[in-house]
Image (cartoon, grey):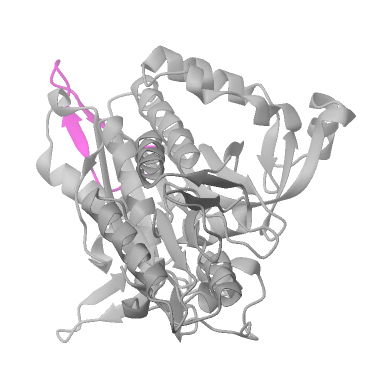
Amino acid sequence: MYLSKLFVPLLKEIPSEAKIKSHQLMLRSGMIRQSSTGIYSWLPLGYKIMKKIEQIVREEQNKIGAQELLMPTIQSAEIWKESGRYEDYGEEMLRIKDRQGKEMLYGPTNEELITEIFRASVKSYKSLPQLLYHIQWKFRDELRPRFGVMRCKEFLMKDAYSFDLSDTEATISYNKMFFAYLQTFKRLGLTAIPMAADTGPIGGDLSHEFVILAETGESRIYSDKRIFDLDISKHSSEDNSIKELRKKYDSFYAVTDDKFRKEDFETKVEKKHQLVTKGIEVGHIFYFGDKYSKPLKCKVDLKDGRKVNVKMGSYGIGVSRLVGAIIEAKFTDNVMRWPESVAPFEVAIIPSLQKNDKSIYAKAETIYKFLKKNNIDVLFDDTDEHLSAKFKKFDLIGIPYQIILGFKDIGDKLEFKEVTGKTETMSLEEIKKKLVNKRNLN
C-alpha cells in the first residue's frame, strides 16, 4: 500500500473529549471517528487491526473444537421474557418494536437465543458436548459511555456457549475456554491474568475475568504477584493438562474488587507478594448450570429415557475493546508498539525524497515491489515530507519495522529499524527472511 493512497486522516491535536491514551491515539492516528455518543466508525487502519485480533480469537476457539455460527443483532423479546431477564436486564438493553408492534431488542448478549437454537435442534445426549460461538456486534445503552472503544455502546464481541450433560463435563468445557483465553491473549502480546469475579447479570456461581494491568483500568484488582510467573507454554490442550493449569492459577489469590475481602487477602498473601492496582477486563467466562436451560425448557434425552436440563456456560471476549486495551498496555514514550501479530502492516519503507534526486524513490519502489511479491504486507511512504516528520507519523501508526532510505550510503545494505529503536544494517534478502520468520512465529 502507498501511504498517499491510504485513507488515514491523521490529527495533529489531541481531541478534547479523549481522556485516555488509547482514545487519543485512535482518533489521532485515524483509526476511528465518532458517529454519535459511544458509537464509532472504524476506518481502514483501525478496522484492519481489529480484524487481525478477530482472526486470532477465531483460531484459538477453533483449536478447542468450538464451532462458529452467526446469530442476528436483533432478537425477539419473547425468549428474554421466557428466561425472566427481559425486565431484569435494565435500561442498558435497547428495546424496539417492528411495524407490526412486535417487541424486539438489540442484543446485548446471546444466552437466550443460543439456548432457543439448541433446544430446537438437539434432543439426545449423543450430541453433547457442544461448544458454539459467534463474533457479532452488540449494543448496550451505556449511561456514561467514555474512554473511546473501551466503554462504548456498540462493540464487536466474541461470545461462546457450552452445552453439557453434567457439572463434571461442563467443568471440562469451562477449562478448555480458560486455556483458549490464555493462549489468545498470549498471541496478542498481552499478559492477562484470570481473576475470580462477580457473575453480574449473566448469573451463575463460577466466573473469571481476564485482566491486563493498566492504570487507566476501571477495575481495581488484588493479586499475588507470583501469578504473573506462571508459564502456560508447558501445558497442552489435553483435559488433564488444562486441569493442572487451572489448579496452578487457582492456588494464587487474584480477585477483582467485587470479590475482594481484606481479611482473605492479608491472610492468604504475604505482604511482599501483594499487588493492588488497576486493570482492564479483556475477557470474561461464566458457568451457570441450568440458569437458562431450565426456564427455557432446554432438555435432552438420556440413555435410560430420562430428560435433563443441559448445563451451560458463557464465554466473552471484547474484540473491539482489545484494540484499545493493547494500546493502553503497549504505548510508551509517544511511540505505539503494536504486537507483530496485530500490527496494521509488517514493515514500512521510509525514503528521504529529494526533489532533484529520483534515485532514492526508485530504490524504494524496487524494495516495495520485491516485498509485495513475497507476500509481505508493506506500507510505502511515498509522500513528499521531511524525514523527521515521517518518523513522527510512523511512531503514531506503530508499524513494528522500518526500512529507512536516507542520506547515508551503505551500498547494497539497508537500514532496518525496529520500533524498539534497535537498528541493523541488512540486505533485502535478510530482511525478507526475518519478516517471514517473525510472521510464522505469530
Query: Residue at 67% across / 39% down in the picture?
Result: 255
- 110 versus 353 height, above or below: above
Quadrant of the image containing the N terminus: bottom left
Work out whether residue 31 or residue 202 is closer to the camera in this orientation and state it. Answer: 31
> Residues in magenta?
289-309
Q: Tell me how many marks there are.
A: 0
Quadrant of the image containing the C terminus: top left
Indicate left or right for 433 with 270 as reference. left
Work out whether residue 140 or residue 126 is closer to the camera in this orientation and state it. Answer: 140
Predominant secondary structure, magenta span: loop
Indicate left or right for 129 with 420 as reference. left
Query: Is 295 covered by the magenta stretch?
Result: yes
Query: Residue at 71% across / 30% down in the picture?
Result: 253
Indicate left or right for 146 with 381 as reference. right
Work out whether residue 317 or residue 381 is closer to the camera in this orientation and state it. Answer: 381
Residue 67: quadrant of the picture: top left
Query: Is 214 covered by the magenta stretch?
Result: no
Q: Position of residue 413 (x, y in %)?
A: 45, 48
Query: Residue at 66% across / 59% down in the picture?
Result: 218
Residue 312 visible in rendering: yes
Q: Position of residue 378 (x, y in %)?
A: 35, 59
- 356 versus 75 height, above or below: below
Residue 81 visible in rendering: no
Indicate left or right for 259 with 400 as reference. right
Residue 42: quadrant of the picture: bottom left
Q: Position of residue 388 (x, y in %)?
A: 60, 73
Q: Position of residue 341 (x, y in %)?
A: 42, 46
